[in-house]
């Protein structure tokens, strides 16, 4: 598989199919059982941790964070791969932090403590931290879990805009298939015995979504490009 700069790529698939395992493997949290990962032509396994941190940023669900920190402080942690051993930020770091807050549109809440934020706001802060890290690749695991329908759409729309504005490759795992179809440039559909990838339109025309779930309860409606519940 290939990730291209400026593209938003969603990974979809049923619970337990391996989406998170795949993302953890790409980002180096766990070793690959098989295969190789190259980032900007460099073999990931040969990259020292600080170099890897300048290439891939990661936003995980339920990752432990210190909610006592203020928003701007948490975003500033994204600069950690570039700061000196005491973590002091220079003018360039400050500019990157400012840019990240602006891109995600959270400047107004930058002085709030993270425990004061809603789940949707916190998710944006974590995305801003990844942007402050200034990497060509951003990986997110279920960035919209715990969010209501409006905020799910808002976060995914934000990722779409960021991929275009910042020219980053953004890869995320999601259960929001209907939203992914509307917003992603490419979709990777993981199934137990095969992986299909392509533009949403390509996957729809190949009827790839038809076999995603057991057919007793829901079905893929090719007219509305969305999953629907069977009423009979
Ligand atoms: N630490 C672990 N040790 C052993 N097996 C694991 C571990 N983590 C995950 N698995 C197993 O690996 C498989 C893939 O899990 P993974 O979490 O990657 O799936 P997923 O597609 O992200 O699922 P979900 O949509 O439920 O988050 C599952 O069968 C899971 O039980």
Image (cartoon, rainbow, N blue to C red):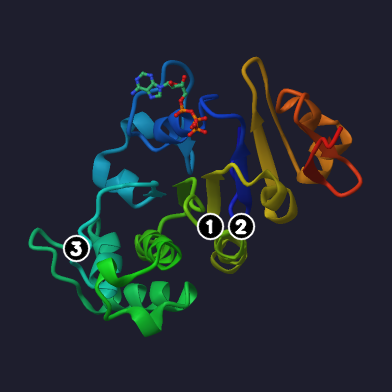
Q: Which residue reaches farthest front?
A: 232
Image-quarter location of ligand 1: top left
Image quadrant occupied by the N terminus: top right
Q: Is residue 63 left or right of residue 218?
A: left
**At numbered mark 2, what does the secondary structure look like: helix, strand or loop?**
loop
Left or right for 124, reference 193:
left
Query: In what quadrant of the picture does the C terminus appear?
Result: top right
Hey, which residue is sitting farthest left in the picture? 86
Q: Position of residue 37 (x, y in %)?
A: 46, 31
Compared to 163, does 27 lie above or below?
A: above
**Element marked by disc 1:** loop
**Disc 3: which residue:** 83
Instruction: Return the residue at label 2.
Output: 6
Calculate the distance from the C-alpha at mark 2 to the C-alpha at mark 3: 27 Å
Viewer-side residue, 156 vs 132: 156
Residue 135 marker: none
- Contact between labelled residues 1 and 2, with CB atoms less than 8 Å apart: yes
Residue, x 53% and y 57% (percent of image)? Answer: 168
Query: Residue extending furthest bottom?
Result: 108
The residue at the point 34 percent across, 69 percent down is 117
Picture residue at 23% right of the left edge, 62% below the top? 67
């Amino acid at each position: 598989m290939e990730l291209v700069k400026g593209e938003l790529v969603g990974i979809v698939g049923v619970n337990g199919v391996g989406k998170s395992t795949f993302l953890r493997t790409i980002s180096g949290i766990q070793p690959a059982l098989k295969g190789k990962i190259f980032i900007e032509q460099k073999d990931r396994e040969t990259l020292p941790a600080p170099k890897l941190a300048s290439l891939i940023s990661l936003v995980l669900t339920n990752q432990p964070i210190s909610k006592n920190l203020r928003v701007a402080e948490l975003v500033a942690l994204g600069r950690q791969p570039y700061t000196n051993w005491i973590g002091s930020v220079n003018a360039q770091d400050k500019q990157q932090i400012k840019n990240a807050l602006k891109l995600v549109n959270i400047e107004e809440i930058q002085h709030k403590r993270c425990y004061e934020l809603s789940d949707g706001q916190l998710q944006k802060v974590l995305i801003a931290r990844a942007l402050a890290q200034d990497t060509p690749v951003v990986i997110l695991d279920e960035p919209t879990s715990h969010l209501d329908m409006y905020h799910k759409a808002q976060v995914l729309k934000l990722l779409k805009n960021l991929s275009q504005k910042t020219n980053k490759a953004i890869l995320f795992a999601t259960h929001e298939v209907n939203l992914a179809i509307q917003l992603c440039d490419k979709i990777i559909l993981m199934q137990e015995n095969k992986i299909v990838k392509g533009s949403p339109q390509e996957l729809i025309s190949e009827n790839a979504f038809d076999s995603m779930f057991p057919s007793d309860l829901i079905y893929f409606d090719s007219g509305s490009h969305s999953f629907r519940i069977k009423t009979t």
